[in-house]
Image (cartoon, grey):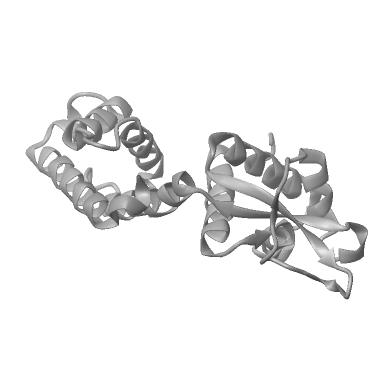
């Protein structure tokens, strides 16, 4: 996926998890979510690689659906069969998404509990950091996604101990790691903001409850 930077790859990943979370998602639906100018084989390769990665991480599950012989134009989402994943096959399903007669069955995907957790909790961590703006960077003109890297790292650390994560330590350590000791991270305002971010995340985790465990 050399044509896509880390930020772009994360956005592709976010869209795929979102689609799989909302409903059982057929492979062709990943194409429908793209802008016309993004519908090309490089993007399809990137999508296939990210789907494969999500399957290996246990974030999504893959199924297939046989055509109903009496209604061959219909792919039945209610009769799904677990199947194995082939990256090359996925790329071609995306490439020929308008030619439904080319394949007898298509891949379908659903999120697992782990995938739901990434969709809901990571999304909220991004939102909390954006709204709290702990270092004041967004208020100074930085883009809205300024803290997305920190959000992903915080989410990764939380997943290591979902039962009782030390959120204050996780949040403050992440920002010190990214921005260094002193400067932005060493002001009372920043430290108070880290504490507030940790409290907001804790509150949201309690609200989400078993849906993210």
| Residue 68 visible within the image | yes
200 or 71: nearer the eye?
A: 71
Which of the 4 quarters of the picture holds residue 28? bottom right
Residue 36 position, x and y percent, is 73, 65
* Outermost residue toward the left in this view: 188
Measured from the top left, where is residue 207 in percent x and y?
24, 57
Q: Residue at position x 15%, y 45% from top? A: 193
Q: Position of residue 120 (x, y in %)?
A: 39, 54
- State which quarter of the image contains the C terminus: top left
Q: Is residue 107 above or below residue 29?
A: above
- In screen coordinates, is 174 left or right of 156? left
Residue at the extreme bottom: 71
Q: Residue at x 84, y 49 (%)?
A: 92
Indicate the position of residue 148 as horizontal and vertical percent values. Answer: 40, 44
The residue closer to the viewer here, 119 or 24, is 24
| Residue 4 visible to the viewer | no
Left or right: 77, with 57 as reference point: right
115 w.r.t. 102: above or below: above
Q: Report the residue at 72% width, 45% height from top.
A: 83
């Amino acid at each position: 996926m050399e044509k896509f930077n880390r930020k772009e790859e994360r956005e592709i990943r976010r869209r795929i998890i979102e689609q799989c979370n909302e409903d059982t998602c057929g492979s062709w639906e990943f194409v429908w979510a793209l802008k016309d100018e993004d519908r090309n084989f490089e993007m399809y390769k990137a999508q296939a690689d990210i789907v494969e990665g999500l399957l290996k991480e246990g974030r999504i599950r893959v199924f297939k659906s046989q055509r109903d012989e009496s209604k061959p134009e219909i792919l039945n989402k209610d009769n799904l069969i677990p199947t194995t994943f082939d990256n090359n096959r996925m790329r071609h399903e995306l490439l020929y998404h308008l030619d439904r007669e080319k394949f007898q069955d298509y891949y379908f995907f659903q999120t697992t509990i782990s995938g739901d957790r990434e969709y809901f909790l990571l999304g909220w961590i991004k939102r909390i950091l954006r709204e709290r703006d702990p270092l004041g960077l967004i208020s100074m003109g930085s883009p809205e996604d300024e803290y997305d890297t920190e959000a992903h790292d915080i989410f990764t650390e939380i997943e290591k101990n979902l039962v009782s994560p030390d959120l204050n330590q996780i949040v403050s350590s992440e920002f010190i790691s990214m921005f260094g000791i002193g400067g932005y991270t060493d002001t009372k305002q920043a430290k108070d903001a880290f504490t507030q971010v940790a409290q907001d995340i804790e509150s949201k985790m309690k609200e989400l409850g078993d849906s993210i465990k």
